[in-house]
Image: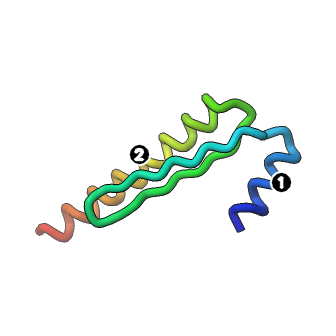
Amino acid sequence: MRRLSQTRKLRSGKSKIVEIKMSIPGSTLLATATDKTFEAAIDDSVETLKRQLKKENEKNQAARH
């Protein structure tokens, strides 16, 4: 599904693809973004990772209590 989405974005001029994989204890986070510039794609990927990290942190805190 992701490949089809990326193909559509490439046709619309969003040709820079960034994929960030982050390993944390107990999990691996993945953020992919496609945009017109690498900077914009990186910004989108970093924001996605921030949301994922926050969710993981909340999940871990709930498990401790």
Q: Which residue is mark 1?
A: 8
Q: Residues within 10 Å of mark 2 (few under 14, many from 20)?
A: few
Instruction: Name the residue located 84 percent from the left edge and 38 percent from the top edge.
Output: 13
Q: Amino acid at mark 1?
A: Arg
* Residue 64: quadrant of the picture: bottom left
**Rendering coords of residue 62 (x, y %):** 20, 67
**Rendering coords of residue 31 (x, y %):** 53, 52
Q: Residues within 10 Å of mark 1 (few under 14, many from 20)?
A: few
Q: Which residue is mark 2?
A: 50
Q: Does residue 53 appear left or right of residue 38 in this picture?
A: left
Q: Does residue 65 appear left or right of residue 30 in this picture?
A: left
Q: Amino acid at mark 2?
A: Lys
**Rendering coords of residue 35 (x, y %):** 71, 39
Instruction: Name the residue located 36 percent from the left edge and 52 percent from the top edge.
Output: 53
Q: Does residue 17 appear left or right of residue 19 in this picture?
A: right
Secondary element under disc 2, as helix, strand or loop, is helix
